[in-house]
Amino acid sequence: MAPACDFGICMKNKTQHQQAKAQWDDAAARRALPPKSPPNWAPQPCGLSREELREIVAEMMG
């Protein structure tokens, strides 16, 4: 019987999976997190109702 990789299905063993996950976790840890907003931050009202916003978005999306 031919190995699974001959058919384009290359399965990783547990060790390879753990190594890949560790590398991904290291890269994610090095990535900078976006700055947090101050605790007193609040969104500014735009003066449009939800229905008006929906109409604008629907018009933009076509």
Image: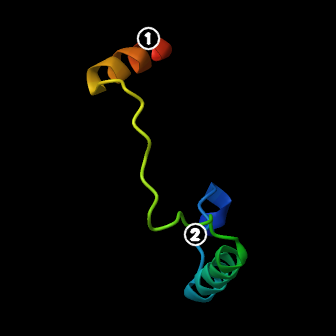
Tell me the kind of residue under disc 2. Met
The residue depicted at 66 percent of the width and 79 percent of the height is: 29
- Rendered position, 34 above or below 17: above
Q: Judge from the rendering whether residue 59 lies leftward or rightward of residue 24; answer left or right.
A: left
Looking at the rendered image, the disc whose residue lies closer to the viewer, 2 or 1, is 1
**Which numbered disc, 2 or 1, marks the residue that appears first in the sequence?**
2
Q: Nearer the viewer, residue 26 or 55?
A: 55
Please tell me how crowded label 2 is: few (under 14), some (14-19), or many (20+) other residues with Cα within 10 Å.
few
Q: Is residue 12 above or below residue 37?
A: below
Q: Residue at x 62, y 66 (%)?
A: 35
- Corner quadrant of residue 26: bottom right
C-beta proximity under 8 Å, tags 2 and 1? no
Q: Secondary structure at mark 1?
A: helix
* Residue annotated with mark 2: 1
Which quadrant of the figure has residue 45?
A: top left
Q: Amino acid at mark 1?
A: Glu
Q: Quadrant of the N terminus?
A: bottom right
The residue closer to the viewer here, 15 or 10, is 15
Residue 9 placed where, x, y %? 59, 61
The residue most toward the bottom is 15
Return the mark for residue 34.
none
- Residue at which label 1 appears: 59
Residue 38, image x, y percentages: 52, 66
